Amino acid sequence: MITIAVGEADFDVAARLAELEAMGGGAVASFTGIVRGDGGLIALELEHYPAMTHEALTRLAEDAARRWPLLGIVLIHRVGRMAPGERIVFVGTASSHRAAALDACHFLIDWLKTEAPFWKKEHRADGSTWVEARTADDAARDRWIRD
Amino acid sequence: MITIAVGEADFDVAARLAELEAMGGGAVASFTGIVRGDGGLIALELEHYPAMTHEALTRLAEDAARRWPLLGIVLIHRVGRMAPGERIVFVGTASSHRAAALDACHFLIDWLKTEAPFWKKEHRADGSTWVEARTADDAARDRWIRD
Amino acid sequence: MAIDFVYFAWVREAIGHDAERLDPPADALTVAAVIDWLSGLSDGHKRAFFDRSRIRAAIDQVFAPLDAPVAGAREIAFFPPVTGG
Amino acid sequence: MAIDFVYFAWVREAIGHDAERLDPPADALTVAAVIDWLSGLSDGHKRAFFDRSRIRAAIDQVFAPLDAPVAGAREIAFFPPVTGG
């Protein structure tokens, strides 16, 4: 079961985890990303490429499902304007093996950060800036590249 | 913030995640273990060493807090009798760094499986058996041992 | 043949709009060649594509390197390195 | 000096009760020596400790290897390898 959701609304983490817990695997892992209020951040704005996003996230989930024995994958990414403390992104996995659930979850958030068409803009009192991509994120992704 | 809970009651994953999300770190990881109904399992019974359990879990959490920059750790382990589909264990971590949250979560569940005084008994229609420790769990734990 | 160009993030802001249908010259065979041509269209396009190392592209919704051929493309997107998650 | 012994899982089931206060001989200096002495107390104790490789111990609520000294111990626990999580 692959569930992909992209939209402006907040999402119900408990409901998504309950779906994954109900899959019978015994192991559920999750990662949630939340807007940080560092440096006087007022709001974070998430832009995406609507025609591409869903397909890119689906390919990502299918890749994870090929690498690990997973029973369920949930990928949720919000777009639009968010305040500090709001959830941006959720990755959830279910498996019969705890390492598979945890590793796949880690893989998915690492790849999502570098391979899905989202862009963040930070709004502060003194202006707005687009977030620069981090080489550390590329390095985190490359850790998963196999020969 | 370290939260340890051991008891017979089920726990509220959403409430625990909300606490971790509220810590301002931006990254929350979780692992939930659920009773599997494999091989006609009717119930799983969890015994523990009450005088030792809380302290063992606290030491485990403190060890994780030394290894990774964590803002919050939640460890919940149920004891008593549970049916397939019920939650047994929950590990949650909050950090400013997604890798720290995810790695610490993985570390905590690996160590909890081999270093905390819990014992599982499986009840089936044809009798009851104590679960044998798995060498794979020891290997998963040893992955985290540093010189 | 006309191609739908779509722009995101500061590429979009520099160009001043989020999409346009244009007909690049027949000798613009790669993404990079198309960028060269687009850069001449306006000051905004020039600014958007000034630092090529910060430009990423997708052809028909699939990431493509700048040396990818554009033959047959219906939609080409330009944007900075992604920063989601 | 009297020590509180506590048992868990199949160790407890084999012995037939979950705790007992006993006074091991002064020459039982290690966990292993205490196990040798306990094994002679009853058929249940003998069964519980028959396969030493499957026995784990804790002294005063801290895991201890079988060659650990027991001097000063107030509580010694015996149990199989843990299987929580």
Image (spheres, coloured by chain):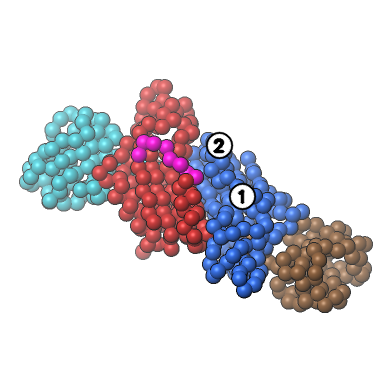
Chain colours: A blue, B red, C brown, D cyan
Which chain does the residue under circle 1 lie in?
Answer: A
Residue at image coords 56%, 41%: A15
Image quarter (top left, top right, bottom left or bottom right) of the N terminus of chain A: top right
Residue at image coords 77%, 67%: C12
Residue A64 visible from this viewpoint? no
Q: Is residue C72 found left or right of C62 in the rendered image?
A: right
Magenta segment: does it hold A38?
Answer: no
**In front here: D36 or A62?**
A62
Q: The magenta stretch spans which residues?
A: B7-14
- The amino acid marked with disc number 2 is Met
- The amino acid marked with disc number 1 is Asp
The disc label shown at residue A23, or none: 2
**Image location of residue C58, percent across then percent down:** 76, 61
Crowding at dot 1, Cα within 10 Å, few <14 / some 14-19 / many 20+, comes out as some
Which residue is the site of mark 1?
Answer: A10
Element type at mark 1: loop
Q: Is residue A75 found left or right of C77 in the rendered image?
A: left
**Image location of residue D71, percent across then percent down:** 12, 51
Image quarter (top left, top right, bottom left or bottom right) of the C terminus of chain A: bottom right
The disc label shown at residue A56, or none: none
